[in-house]
Structure formats: structure tokens, C-alpha cells
Amino acid sequence: MESLCNRYKEYFKIGASVNTETAITDQKILLQHFNSITFENEIKFVNIQPNQNEFDFSNSDKLVEFALANKLQVRGHTLIWHAQLPDWVNKDRLPTRTELLKVMENHICTIVDRYKDSIFIWDVVNEILADDGSLKNTIWREIIGDDYIERAFWFAHDANPKAKLFYNEYNCEITGKRESVVEFYNKAKKQNIPLDGIGLQGHFGIYYPTADMFRDVFKTYAKTDMRLEITEMDMSMFRYEDHRTDLKQPTKEMIETQAKSYGEFFALFREYKDLIDGVTFWGVSDRYTWLDDFPVTRKNWPLIFDEFNHPKKAYDAIMNW
Ligand code: XIL
């Protein structure tokens, strides 16, 4: 079987998110088809700094070693986010700008510095905008101010000037949000903030959004010099509002619709290959996906390998063009 990353070697890197478990259980297809990995949760704040100034690198170190041994690029995900924060990061304990900035600096610099010889791409900030395009109100923004974002980029840049620094966002196909991301990028560039590109998460569904809707994102972003990565692609079998929990297997129609949409999205990515450095799936195979627990607990099948790690129709659709 031809390898997926080999098929796309003239286009962009092909990545998958892994955790300490799937890096072992799915190792065979991971090493065969992917040349980049993202750690699903191991670098997130709650896991890597569970108590103030007590860092736990045990799991991230393990995965970095695994990546280096197998020549996989690592995307560092993620430094500053409002979710998956430990309890000690709260407004009562850290009520002043000075204190929280210190926490942020220590967090970013410690991690980026530890992996300065192994991780060269970072999602510095994650999900900073609401769907209407306004800045999300998070503890970072409330206590530090709007400039928490540029400060985060500078801390990361100072810790490793060679690293590519990304801002990672979801739902960028939404009109308004799409434009706000560009505005943010252009403003940051004017201020010389060390921002290299935008990560488009890509948590899609088989019915929405269509590749055609997403084309407008590339059209708009192509007018800038930003680098792009699809950072978390998957394609739920369910509509967002469909919370059914009784489906044991995807229907034939679902499998085919998914394959068609994956095929169309990858055709679009190939068309815009000059802007795109990588396409990462949020998971390796349907054996494990975060969508088994989100937005409700039920089996989902959003990836291109099935529960037995065999290639699905979606795999064929992106391999054969
Ligand atoms: C998800 C993980 O996959 C889950 O295991 C965890 O419980 C919650 O976070 N956007 C992101 C990712 O940027 O970090 C999220 O990952 C999925 C949505």
C-alpha cells in the first residue's frame, strides 16, 4: 500500500495527533503514513504544569523521544488556551497583570526552551476569537489585557527564535471570524510580532462545511503572506445538533458522503498547496477519537482509517486523484 505522506510529499506534511497510548497501539500505520505528529493533551497546561512551577514532562518527553527516533516532525500544541487549565490558574489566586504575566512567561519559556532542539512549530495561542470575530474573554485577557497575545508570541520567540509560531483557530469558515483572523494577522505583522501563520483546526462534519465553503478561507488568506496548516482535521458522521447515541455502525451513505467530502477537501488543499505546510488529522484511526466523547458520548468515525486500522473509503478518496 502506498504511504499517504509519500503521496503528498510534493504538497505538504501529513500529521496525526497521538497520545502516549495511541503512539503505541497505532504505531504501525502512524509510521507508515504520517511524517508529523501533534500531542493530543500532553503539552496542555493542566498536564504539563499541574502545580505552580512543578512541571511534569514525563509524557511529553516520551513522545518527543518517539518522534525523534522515527524522524517525525512535532507540532507543539498548545501554550496559551482558556481550556484545560489547572485549578491553580484562577482569578482569585492570580488577580494582577504582573502576576499572571509572570506565570505566562515562566510557562511558555520553560516548555519552549526544553524542546528547543526538537519542536520547531508551536501553537502559541489557541482559540482566541469567538465565532462573531471578537476577542474571547478568557482569564488571560481579563487579567493581563488584550496584549496577552503579543506577549505570548514574544515569550515563545525569545525562548526559541528559530521556531515557527502559529495562532490556532476553529470555525474559520464563518463569515466575520474569517476576516477577523486576517485583521489580527495583518495588525500583528505591522507591529512586528513574531507570528508565522495560522492553524485552521478543521473539525468538520460530513455535511458541513463543504470544501466549497472553505475555499473562501483560502481565497481570503491567500491575499496575505501567512503560512497555513490544517491542524486538527476530522469529519464527524453526525450533524452538530444530532446527538443520537444508538448508532453502532456508520451507514453506507455516511461512509460514502464522508469519502466524497474528504476527497473534495484534499483537492482544495492541493490547489492551495503553496500556502499550506501541513495537514494534521486529529487522531490516527477510528479506534480512538475525542469525538467518542464530544459533544456527547457515543461512537463516531471521523478519520480515514477504521476501528481495525484499515483504510476507509475516505483514505482511497484522498490517495487516488
Ligand atoms: C481535545 C482532546 O482531543 C481531548 O482529549 C480533550 O479532552 C479536549 O481537547 N481543539 C483543540 C484541541 O485545540 O486541543 C482539542 O483536543 C480539540 C478541540
Image (cartoon, rainbow, N blue to C red):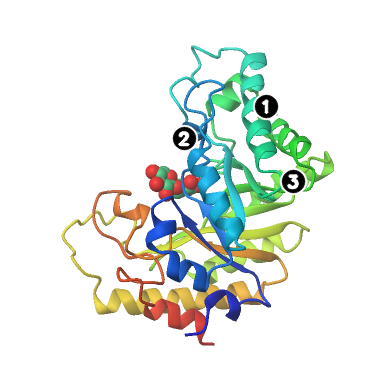
Task: Place residue 199 in its image quadrant.
Answer: bottom right
Q: Which residue corresponds to mark 2?
A: 47
Judged from the image, the secondary structure of the residue bearing numbered disc 2 is helix
Q: Residues within 10 Å of mark 3 (few under 14, many from 20)?
A: many
Q: Report the disc number at residue 158.
A: none
Nearer the observer: mark 2 or 1; the answer is: 2
Q: Quadrant of the C terminus?
A: bottom right
Q: Any atom of ligand 1 within 8 Å of the CB at mark 3?
A: no
Q: Are marks 2 and 3 in contact (CB under 8 Å)?
A: no
Q: Residues within 10 Å of mark 1 (few under 14, many from 20)?
A: some
Task: Report the Cα–Cα distance between label 1 and label 3.
Answer: 17 Å
Marks 1 and 3, the one that precedes in the sequence: 1
Residue 179 locus on image (x, y percent)? 65, 51
Judged from the image, the secondary structure of the residue bearing numbered disc 3 is loop
Q: Which residue corresponds to mark 3?
A: 195
Q: Which kind of residue does numbered mark 1 sit on? A: Glu
Q: Residues within 10 Å of mark 2 (few under 14, many from 20)?
A: some
Judged from the image, the secondary structure of the residue bearing numbered disc 1 is helix
Residue 234 locus on image (x, y percent)? 44, 62
Q: Report the disc number at residue 105.
A: 1
Task: Report the Cα–Cα distance between label 2 and label 3.
Answer: 25 Å
Residue at x-position 25% and y-position 59%: 299
